[in-house]
Every structure is written in C-alpha cells, then in structure tokens.
C-alpha cells in the first residue's frame, strides 16, 4: 500500500457512495443552524434587558458583541441560566443527531471499502464503480441504530475532553499575571496548543469510529486496537492525516479567495445582483467538498486498518500481523 493508493481508493469509494456525503452535509448544516437559534435569541434577550435597539448591538464589532452579551447576562442570573439551558439543550440534541448519522455513514463506507475490490488500480470501469456503491437506506439506518450506543459513549468522552481542554486553555489565557506583563505571547501559544490538541483528539476519534464499525467491538477494545494500528502503520496513517490536513488548508484558502472575489462583484451595478446566489452556491460547494475530503480520509484509514486485521489484503512481500 502507498499513500497515493489509499487516498485514490478513499476518493473513489466515497464518490461511489455520494449519498452519505450529502447526508453528512445536511446533518452538519442542521446542527449549526439549530445552535445559532439560542445564540441569536440570546442577542435579542440582551437587547431587551438593556432596553436598547437591536441595531445598536449589531453596530458593534464581533470582538465587542460577545463581551457585551456576557456582561449583560452575568448581571441577570435568571436570564443567564435560561440562555445556558437553551444552548445545552440544542447542543445535546444536535450532538445526538450527529452521532446517529455518523454511525450510518461509517457503516456504509466500511462495507463499501471492504467490497470495492482493487478499484484504485486502473483501468477504472463502471462495473467496478458500481460494486463499490453500498449505500441503501436500510443499510444506513441499521448501521446507525446498531452503532449509536457505542458512538454515543465515545461522543460523551469526546465532549468531556473538549470541555476540560477549553477550561484549561481559558484558565491559561485569562490567569492573572504580573503588572505590566505582556500576555499576548502566552495567549497565542495557548491557542495554538489548543488547536493542535483538538486536532489530535478529532483524529483519534475518527480512528476509534472506524475500528468500532469494522470489528463491531466495544469502545475499550477499540482503544487497544487503535494503539496497535498506530504502532504498526504509524507512517502511513500519519501521511494520510497530513495529506488530508493539507487538502483542508488549500480548500479553505480557495474558499476565502472565492468569497473575496464575490464580495468585489457585489459592488458592480446590476452584475452585483448575481453575487448573492453565487455566494450561496459557493457556500454549498464548500460544505460538500469539506465533507467529501473528511470521508475520503475515513475510507483511506479504513483500508489501512483492514490490511492490519486481514493480512490477505496486503500485496505479496508485505507484512501485516493480524490483531484479532
């Protein structure tokens, strides 16, 4: 196996099961839209509490809106409790939805990767592409229901790690220092360390999801198997991670440039009327592409793990000890 073969296989298998890409995109959009509801409601609540005009709050910069909302809500304990309760309810419900959808997505892609054959090797023919298509509504829903309890348990651990990491990061940034001490460097270092740590946590979370779906094992067993995977295939797994991260960075840069270009078009008379639908299309394409890249990496890692647990899938001359 090579990095190119793994990524090519992941891209083709994901394209053959494009249905899960759209499902993941819709679920992610719903989660973010639901989370925005209590945040916007909190803004209106702040406006009502201070007796001002909503335009006055919107006139502030983003760096001023959040401190203003926090200060007003902290002065009103009941309003703060209602706001936090609304955010917690939406966050909990949205997370449960994402865990459920992820179970169906991973089960479909793991089955497709297992049955795809040597799709990454040319020539690519239509029957081979159809053989890699394993999405059915029944398979998706059965996989989601079957994996949901374990994915829920794994997600709870993920949320706990997120919360603990955020608290530690904020404590480092806002801890009192010496008078006149410049803490900007500490804030930058803490933020960079937080982003790197969360990225590592999400990567481990992805591998655990793959192992649970592939071996139908518990979360505890999956932790052991992921450790063996990293010890045995560390270089290939790391290469896939770095390549995926590079693709995400390039896609983000391209989306920023496209948004800036469309923003310039908006100032052109008459032609600027087309800016809004173009921006909407660009936003949709960006969301779908990000989901496609993430699921491509999932299939590539699933291929690497399958070579570890089933030595028969490794080319002649390679060595892959079985883990079960």
Image (cartoon, helix red, strand yellow):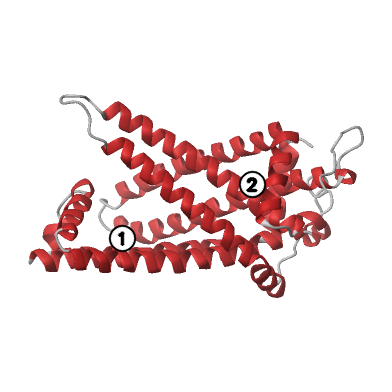
From the top left corner, tell me how far across and down residue 51 is, in percent.
Answer: 7, 67
Q: CA distance from mark 1 to mark 2?
A: 38 Å
Q: Is residue 130 left or right of residue 23?
A: right
Q: Is residue 90 left or right of residue 319?
A: left
Residue under pointer 2? 297
Q: How many marks?
A: 2
Examine the rendering and report whether any part of residue 121 can be seen.
no
Q: In the current view of this chain or complex, which residue is farthest to the left?
A: 51
Query: 10 Å neighbourhood of mark 1: few (<14), some, or many (≥20)?
Result: few
Front residue of 151/43: it is 151
| Residue 170 position (above or below residue 148) | above
- Res 242 → quadrant: top right
From the top left corner, tell me how far across and down residue 238 is, in percent.
Answer: 64, 34
Q: Is residue 48 left or right of residue 225?
A: left
From the top left corner, tell me how far across and down residue 115 is, in percent.
Answer: 82, 58
Mark 1 and mark 2 lie on one chain; the one further toward the N terminus is 1
Residue under pointer 1? 273
- Res 224 → quadrant: top right
Q: Secondary structure at mark 1?
A: helix
């Amino acid at each position: 196996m090579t990095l190119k073969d793994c990524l090519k296989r992941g891209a083709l298998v994901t394209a053959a099961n494009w249905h899960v890409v759209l499902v993941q995109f819709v679920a992610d959009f719903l989660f973010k839209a639901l989370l925005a509801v209590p945040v916007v409601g909190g803004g209106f609540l702040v406006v009502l509490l201070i007796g001002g005009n909503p335009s006055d709050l919107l006139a502030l910069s983003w760096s001023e809106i959040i401190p203003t909302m926090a200060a007003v809500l902290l002065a009103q304990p009941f309003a703060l409790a209602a706001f936090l309760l609304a955010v917690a309810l939406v966050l909990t419900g949205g997370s449960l939805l994402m865990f459920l959808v992820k179970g169906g997505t991973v089960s479909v892609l793991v089955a497709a990767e297992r049955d795809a054959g040597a799709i990454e090797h040319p020539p690519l023919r239509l029957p081979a592409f159809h053989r890699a298509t394993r999405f059915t509504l029944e398979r998706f829903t059965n996989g989601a229901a079957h994996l949901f309890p374990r994915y829920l348990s794994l997600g709870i651990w993920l949320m706990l790690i997120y919360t603990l990491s955020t608290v530690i990061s904020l404590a480092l940034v806002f801890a009192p220092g010496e008078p006149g001490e410049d803490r900007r460097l500490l804030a930058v270092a803490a933020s960079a360390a937080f982003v790197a740590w969360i990225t590592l946590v999400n990567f481990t979370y992805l591998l655990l999801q793959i192992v649970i779906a592939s071996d139908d094992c518990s979360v505890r067993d999956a932790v052991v198997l992921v450790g063996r995977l990293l010890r045995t295939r560390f270089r290939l797994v790391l290469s896939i991670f770095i390549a995926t991260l590079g693709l995400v960075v390039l896609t983000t840069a391209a989306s920023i440039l496209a948004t800036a270009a469309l923003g310039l078009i908006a100032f052109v008379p008459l032609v600027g009327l087309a800016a809004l639908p173009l921006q909407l299309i660009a936003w949709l394409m960006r969301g779908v592409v990000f989901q496609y890249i993430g699921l491509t990496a999932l299939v590539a890692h699933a291929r690497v793990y399958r070579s570890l647990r089933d030595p028969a899938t490794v080319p002649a001359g390679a060595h892959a000890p079985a883990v079960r």
